[in-house]
Amino acid sequence: MNKTAKAYISLFKIRVAESFQYRMAAFSGVLTSLVWAFVDVVAFTAFFRYGDRAKFAGGLTLEQTISHIWVRELLLFLQPFSIDDELLLKINNGDMGLEMCRPLDLYWHWFARSSARCIVMFVMRCLICFAVGFIIPGGYGARSPVSPGAFWLFVPSACCAFWLSSAYGMLVTAVRANIAWGDGPMYFMLLIGQVLSGGYLPLQLWPNFLQPFLLLQPFAGLTDIPARLYIGSMPLSEAWLGMGVQLFWSAAFILLGKRILSCRLRTIAAQGG
């Protein structure tokens, strides 16, 4: 057991070291994130200042909404936008049989690879973007957490978001491994996760009657729950509920992903000699 855990950790470290080579791609990604974040901030500023509900909407003030946007950019690549390119290539080319030759559990092997990719993008792109956001003047930049307590609850919630993202990314990978007729279902699942995570619009700005569902559905834990703790729109006394939702759905995605991938491995046919 100890040797197996060390093997997964080694795979994680190797993947991280490989991904850190793509520095120019990360730099261009930082610029892209900054531009889109600034566009969103300007758009929401105009909405709050000149709309019918100029001071707040959905329980959020303009300052909280701007902070939410920058926290979203910080957590952007802790949520899956695609599955690992090498894994997708192996699935499409029928090379999964080679992966099964390794003396490791295939699910956790792929989990280590996918999570390493998220960590690298978080460090090389999101952290830098968030740091630059702090120096943007005129009320358009990132803001500090509302309190020290909010920060210390935001950190474990962000870690839970990383675990949830990795679990959902592996679920999507497992589903794609079971589909022989294209990538459509995979991209549909990824898009649903991005929309319901608050990646396009903070969930608290959605209609009020949807709020109970939006808070408890699995994708709120990717962005919205950590952001609520950061900006103070979720009481600190309810942080246990938010992180409980994140951990519950993480476990559910892991169990479901392992089940789907296990079914695929039992029916896989390897040809050649």
Image: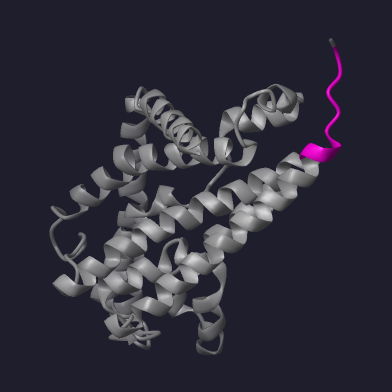
Q: Nearer the viewer, residue 55 or 97?
A: 97
Q: Can you give x and y, in whole percent of width and height, for residue 264 in the image? A: 79, 41
Confirm whether residue 52 shows in the render.
Answer: yes
Compared with 87, 142 (above or below) is below
92 lies above or below 48: above
Q: Is residue 150 above or below residue 207?
A: above
Q: Is residue 4 left or right of residue 147?
A: right
Q: Quadrant of residue 124?
A: top left
Residue 86 appears left or right of 141: right
Q: Quadrant of residue 123?
A: top left
Is 48 magenta? The answer is: no
User: In which quadrant of the rendered image does the C terminus lie?
Assistant: top right
- Seen as rendered, the residue at the extreme front is 1
- Tell whether 176 sits left or right of 208: right
**Highlighted range, magenta:** 265-272
Lateral position of residue 125 relative to residue 10, left or right: left
221 or 52: nearer the viewer? 221
**Would you identify the image quadrant in which residue 269 lies?**
top right
- Out of 246 and 53, give the one closest to the viewer: 246
Front residue of this view, candidates 75 and 135: 75
| Residue 195 shows in this picture | no
Q: How is the image coloured?
A: one colour
- Residue 3 x %, y %: 47, 32
- Residue shown at 26% from the left, 73% from the top: 231
Residue 188's x, y, as percent? 68, 54
